[in-house]
Amino acid sequence: MKCIIDSYAWVEYFIGSEKGKVLRKLFLDKNNNFFTVECCLAEIKGWALRNSKDFSKFFEIIKRNSKKLLITEEDWISSAEERFKQRKTQKDFGLIDSIILSKQKELNCKIITGDKHFKEMRDVVFIS
């Protein structure tokens, strides 16, 4: 299974929560392939700063367990369209979420998250 891990799921994994155990279990299956969209790194760094955590340790874990997905000019353009569509039903759907959703559609994969914006979407492993 191919999966994009979003910031929410990574943070739950890092703090060792019950929600994070879902990701830990998925890591055990060597048939799974994991990706992290590069914009999530900024969100995780922000979380680490707010919580006085060492981002470098988390970054090493991310690199060891997933492949980084770079964001291209086309990704930004398609994410603007995706955000426009999503905001018809979710007024606070953000640009980072739109990037993740665009990359998911491009890769035809699942998203692992606990973010409420993805709760009712297809191809989402919702951790709750």
Image (cartoon, rainbow, N blue to C red):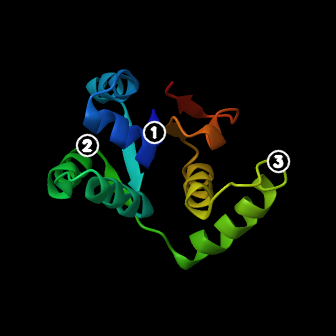
Q: Residue drawn at (61%, 34%), measured in percent from left and top?
A: 123
Which of marks 2 and 3 precedes in the sequence?
2
Which of marks 1 and 3 precedes in the sequence?
1
Which secondary structure lies at badge 1?
strand
Q: Residue drawn at (76%, 53%), measured in percent from left and top?
A: 86
Viewer-closest of 122 and 58: 58
The disc label shown at residue 89, or none = 3
Quadrant (top left/top right/bottom left/bottom right) for the N terminus: top left
Q: Is 18 placed above or below 32 here?
A: above
For label 3, the crowd category at 10 Å Cα-Cα, with few meaning under 14, some 14 to 19 and many 20 or more, is few
Which of marks 1 and 2 precedes in the sequence?
1
Q: Is 12 placed left or right of 102 in the picture?
A: left
Check disc 2 and give the amino acid type. Asn
Location of residue 75 (image quadrant): bottom right
Q: Which residue is mark 1?
A: 2
- Residue, far bottom: 73
